[in-house]
Image (tube, coloured by chain):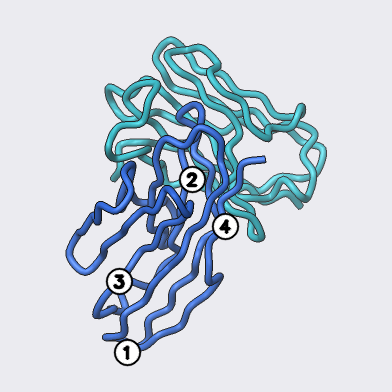
């Protein structure tokens, strides 16, 4: 167990629907990162939060949004889902706003299937 | 645009073989290069490299970075079936955002 908790583990939903993915970072970590991993692509950075504030944004679609709450857990909201949104969504956390010698700690991911 | 390219895409070997995985990168404001192993789900951290020419070693795995030629290699000696996984290379640039390559899938057969 890495200490980063993601729920749910699997999600199957229909096109056009909206889902929320949840992430609890490792105890003491202030930064949360969201990544998308599709079959034909590597891990794609979506967004980072540090201590409740958005810190960096990657290739995140306008249909997607995220936030980090005062207790530091984070939620990734995906709306108007399309078949192409089917992927593994990973959350990762780190202590501060800079990586230390061990990089991120990843959660076990949420597998989203859009049918 | 920042990018990380890994080769080969896939590798099939027998137990006991030695393998070399490659990672080249083009990023602005390079800070560090990381290697991860991904078996079923979450990538697990292997190495973080920041300086050229200094080999990092952990058991049968080792890695080195060349900041002049912009690449890194990951070596695995005396491979075992448990080494079968996708190996991911990532570069930290600008902020602490990691840019990942698409990975090298290693399959080790007995």
Mark 3–mark 1 distance (CA, rounded to whole Å): 16 Å
Q: Which residue is mark 3?
A: B76
Residue A11 locus on image (x, y percent): 60, 46
Q: Nearer the viewer, mark 4 or mark 1?
A: 4
Q: Secondary structure at mark 1?
A: loop
> Which residue appears farthest toward the left when viewing the image?
B59
Mark 2–mark 3 distance (CA, rounded to whole Å): 27 Å
Q: Which residue is mark 2?
A: A109
* Chain to which mark 4 belongs: B
Q: Secondary structure at mark 3?
A: strand
* Chain to which mark 3 belongs: B
Q: Determine whether B81 is above or below A41 in the image.
A: below
Q: Nearer the viewer, mark 2 or mark 3?
A: 3
* Marks 2 and 4 belong to one chain: no
Left or right: where A63 falls relative to A35:
right
Left or right: where A14 falls relative to B97:
right
Label 2 close to label 1 by CB (< 8 Å): no
Q: Which residue is mark 1?
A: B110
């Amino acid at each position: 167990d890495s200490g980063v908790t993601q729920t749910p583990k699997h999600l199957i939903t229909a096109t056009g629907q909206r889902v929320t993915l949840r992430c609890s970072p490792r105890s003491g970590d202030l930064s949360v990162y969201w990544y998308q991993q599709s079959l034909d692509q590597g891990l794609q950075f979506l967004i980072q939060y540090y201590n409740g504030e958005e810190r960096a944004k990657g290739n995140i679609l306008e249909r997607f949004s995220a936030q980090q709450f005062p207790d530091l857990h984070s939620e990734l909201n995906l709306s108007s889902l399309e078949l192409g949104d089917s992927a593994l969504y990973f959350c990762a956390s780190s202590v501060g706003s800079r990586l230390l010698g061990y990089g991120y700690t990843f959660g076990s991911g949420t597998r989203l299937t859009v049918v | 645009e920042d990018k990380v390219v890994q080769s080969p895409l896939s590798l099939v070997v027998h137990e006991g073989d030695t393998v070399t995985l490659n990672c080249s990168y083009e990023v602005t404001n390079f800070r560090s290069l990381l290697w991860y192993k991904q078996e079923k789900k979450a990538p697990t951290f292997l190495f973080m490299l920041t300086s050229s020419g200094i080999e990092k070693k952990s058991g049968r795995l080792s890695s080195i970075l060349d900041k002049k030629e912009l690449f890194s290699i990951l070596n695995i000696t005396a491979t075992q079936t448990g080494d079968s996984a996708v190996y991911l290379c990532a570069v930290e640039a600008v902020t602490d955002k990691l840019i990942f390559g698409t990975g090298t899938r290693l399959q080790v057969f007995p």
